[in-house]
Image: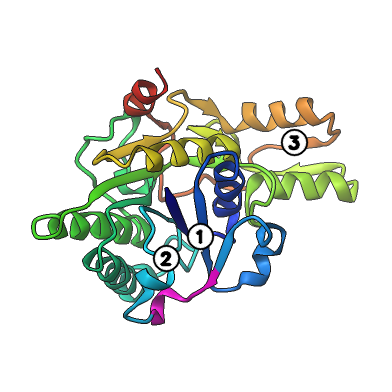
């Protein structure tokens, strides 16, 4: 079995490659900058490609994979940028349509919990989506476009909605990385929000395992939440990181306001993943 990964040099992508290397599959890692994949170059095929200007034979250049894990998306973490639906959405759809029309049998695309908008509590994957920022809107629109495409193109389709992640290699804008860097600098205080918001967090290594498991099934799974299924306050999570790593720093709670583009409490259910793991 051959699996291609777009956005392979990103935070999630590199963990997916590490996970795939433990499986008996052939791997094609696609990135705009293959130099960022140097540590994988001996074990996987790398392909430099920008999906905004892909050749018509890009599916052939990938080696006609049996499954594609599609992670590539530009413009993050600015969720409010109009770029997401003005520029990113059309190029994403055109790229995916091209490789599906060329014969891709199975596609997994990374979605986002922001597709749910301001809905609170336990979020089921079959809830009606109500995105309230440009990023969530563009992702939701791409999902719908691909579902319409299924009406005249046969392919297995899984839309994996990612919730919150943390781990090694995360961007400098993330809470985990900021905390780690503050500790490394010897800061006495770490500024953060009040920390009472409830979120659904997973270590990125577990996220990678779940995405790989979904992709390798090569089944038409529809929408799936990639989540823990349990809420945890941001404050409690940060305190767990401090205890686990023996980091010594005081938390300055309430320094930043809570984000206005997400509710105070939400988490995802994941019965599909529970079923696959049995």
Toward the viewer: 218 or 260? 218
User: Would residue 180 be found to the left or right of residue 49 on screen?
Assistant: right
Which dot marks residue 253? none
Q: Earlier in the sequence, mark 3 or mark 2?
A: 2
Q: Residue at 65% across / 42% down in the picture?
A: 167
Q: Nearer the viewer, mark 3 or mark 1?
A: 1
How much space separates mark 3 and mark 2, taking CA atoms? 50 Å
User: Would residue 248 be found to the left or right of residue 133 on screen?
Assistant: right
Q: Residue at 84% across / 43% down in the picture?
A: 183
Residue wearing tag 2: 63
Give how far across and how far down residue 21 sits, in percent: 59, 45
Q: Residue at 60% across / 47% down in the picture?
A: 15
Residue wearing tag 3: 251
User: Would residue 245 be found to the left or right of residue 74 on screen?
Assistant: right
Answer yes or no: do the residues labelled 3 and 1 have beta carbons within 8 Å? no
How much space separates mark 3 and mark 1, taking CA atoms? 43 Å
Q: Quadrant of residue 61?
A: bottom left
Give how far across and how far down residue 9 sits, in percent: 59, 61
Q: Tell me if residue 29 comes above or below residue 24 in the rendering.
A: below
Q: Earlier in the sequence, mark 3 or mark 1?
A: 1
Q: Nearer the viewer, mark 1 or mark 2?
A: 2
Give neighbour class at mark 1: few <14, some 14-19, many 20+ (Cα, 10 Å): many
Give neighbour class at mark 2: few <14, some 14-19, many 20+ (Cα, 10 Å): some
Secondary-structure class at tag 1: strand
Toward the viewer: 62 or 111? 62
Which dot marks residue 28? 1
Magenta-colored span: 47-54
Answer yes or no: do the residues labelled 1 and 2 have beta carbons within 8 Å? yes
Q: Tell me if residue 137 comes above or below residue 117 in the rendering.
A: below
Give how far across and how far down residue 63 sits, in percent: 42, 65
How much space separates mark 1 and mark 2, taking CA atoms? 8 Å
């Amino acid at each position: 079995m051959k699996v291609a990964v777009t956005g392979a040099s990103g935070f999630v992508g590199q963990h997916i490659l590490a996970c795939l290397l433990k499986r008996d599959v052939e791997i094609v890692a696609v990135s705009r900058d293959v130099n960022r994949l140097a540590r994988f170059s001996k074990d996987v095929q790398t392909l430099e490609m920008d999906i905004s200007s892909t050749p018509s034979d890009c599916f052939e250049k990938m080696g006609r994979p049996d499954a594609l894990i599609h992670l590539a998306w530009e413009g993050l973490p600015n969720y409010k940028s109009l770029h997401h639906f003005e520029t990113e959405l059309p190029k994403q759809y055109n790229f995916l349509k091209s490789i599906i029309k060329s014969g891709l049998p199975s596609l997994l695309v990374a979605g986002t919990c922001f597709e749910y908008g301001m809905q609170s509590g336990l979020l089921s994957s079959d809830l009606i989506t109500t995105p309230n920022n440009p990023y969530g809107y563009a992702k939701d629109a791409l999902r719908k476009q691909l579902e319409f495409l299924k009406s005249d193109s046969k392919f297995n389709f899984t839309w994996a909605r990612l919730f919150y992640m943390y781990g090694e290699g995360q961007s400098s804008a993330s809470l985990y990385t900021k905390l780690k860097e503050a500790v490394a600098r010897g800061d006495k205080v770490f500024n953060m929000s009040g920390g009472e918001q409830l979120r659904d967090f997973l270590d990125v290594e577990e996220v990678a395992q779940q995405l790989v498991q979904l992709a390798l099934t090569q089944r038409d799974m529809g929408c799936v939440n990639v989540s823990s299924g349990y809420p945890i306050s941001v404050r409690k999570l940060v305190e767990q990181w401090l205890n686990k790593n023996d980091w010594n720093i005081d938390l300055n709670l309430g320094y930043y306001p809570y984000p206005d583009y997400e509710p105070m409490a939400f988490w995802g259910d994941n019965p599909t993943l529970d079923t696959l793991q049995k």
